Amino acid sequence: MKVGFIGLGHLGTEIAKRLSSQGVELIVWNRTIEKAKKLGFPTVEKPADLLSHVDRVFLIVFDSQASQEVIFGRGGLVEGNIEGKTIIDMTTNHYAYTERAYQELKEYGAYYLDAPVLGSVIPAQRGELVMLVGGDKEKYEENFPLFEKFCRKVYYVGKAGDGTKLKLINNMVLGGFMQVLAEALAVGELAGFDKELLLSVLSDGAGKSYILDVKKQKLLEEDFSTHFSVDLIYKDLHYAQDLLRDTKAFSFALQNVKEAYGMARFMGMGELDFSAVYKVFKKA
């Protein structure tokens, strides 16, 4: 099977490589085309050109503005042979955008799946991502065999927009948990405890979690090479604030968690892994 693929950031690259290793033929458009060529993927000059070759396109870019540009902008997918084709958007978007994109693509006779994923670089390499899919169930079922090639679990969650809402709710927990771990580690060090001991105790105590398991070594070695960036978690928490507003919910924690990552960005750490928020509290 041949599919189109847009977006070779940290996570997109690993998903593309995983699909390729599972026998899926990819044709790629990326803003930095040399990155695609370096990985050995055939490329096209603009997103619209993909639809001369494939019936479905995977998309994973920074935010909703970037998604809108590659779908609806100049040279975007809608300028290609889009009728009857399926766009699978794995970007962590703003939910209002995904609802609008679904409707607008429907007017073109095309299909849109709101399909963000949970997990970052290492789970992608192992084929262990979790996908949350909103949109037409028929298209979800049609593409499910592809999703299984890089996901350990795929949820069909309802209409377009619902996948993104669940992803934002998940990332409220993700961002908050990482911040609390960072704070606790910094406090423990200031209290005179060895970092390795602290991480071991937290791993066997209340800090025991998937996020500590995957970030423990980064925190220990202060290796903040990027799997999931500070800029991305900050953007996701900003979108989550809009969700709280629109649902008339409230949160005591979300604003403070977001601003911790805002401080990390202010300190020049926006492109580092989001576990670098530890450095905010270590320097406080």
Image: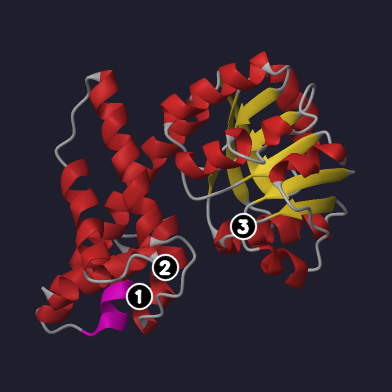
Residue at left offset 79%, top offset 43%: 50
Q: CA distance from mark 2 to mark 3?
A: 29 Å
- Give the label on residue 219, or none: 1
- Where disc 2 sits, the SS reads helix
The residue carrying pointer 2 sits among few (fewer than 14), some (14 to 19) or many (20 or more) residues within 10 Å by Cα, namely: some
Q: CA distance from mark 1 to mark 3?
A: 32 Å
Q: Quadrant of residue 249?
A: top left
- Where disc 1 sits, the SS reads helix
Residue nearest the observer in this picture, 195 or 110: 110
Vertical comparison of 56 with 192: above or below: above
- Amino acid, disc 2: Lys
Residue at left offset 51%, top offset 30%: 163
- Amino acid, disc 3: Arg
The residue carrying pointer 3 sits among few (fewer than 14), some (14 to 19) or many (20 or more) residues within 10 Å by Cα, namely: some
Residue at the spot of label 2: 215
- Amino acid, disc 1: Leu
Residue at the spot of label 3: 31
In primary-sequence order, the first of circles 1 and 3 is: 3
Query: Which contiguous range is marked in magenta?
Result: 194-200
Q: CA distance from mark 1 to mark 2?
A: 6 Å
- Where disc 3 sits, the SS reads loop
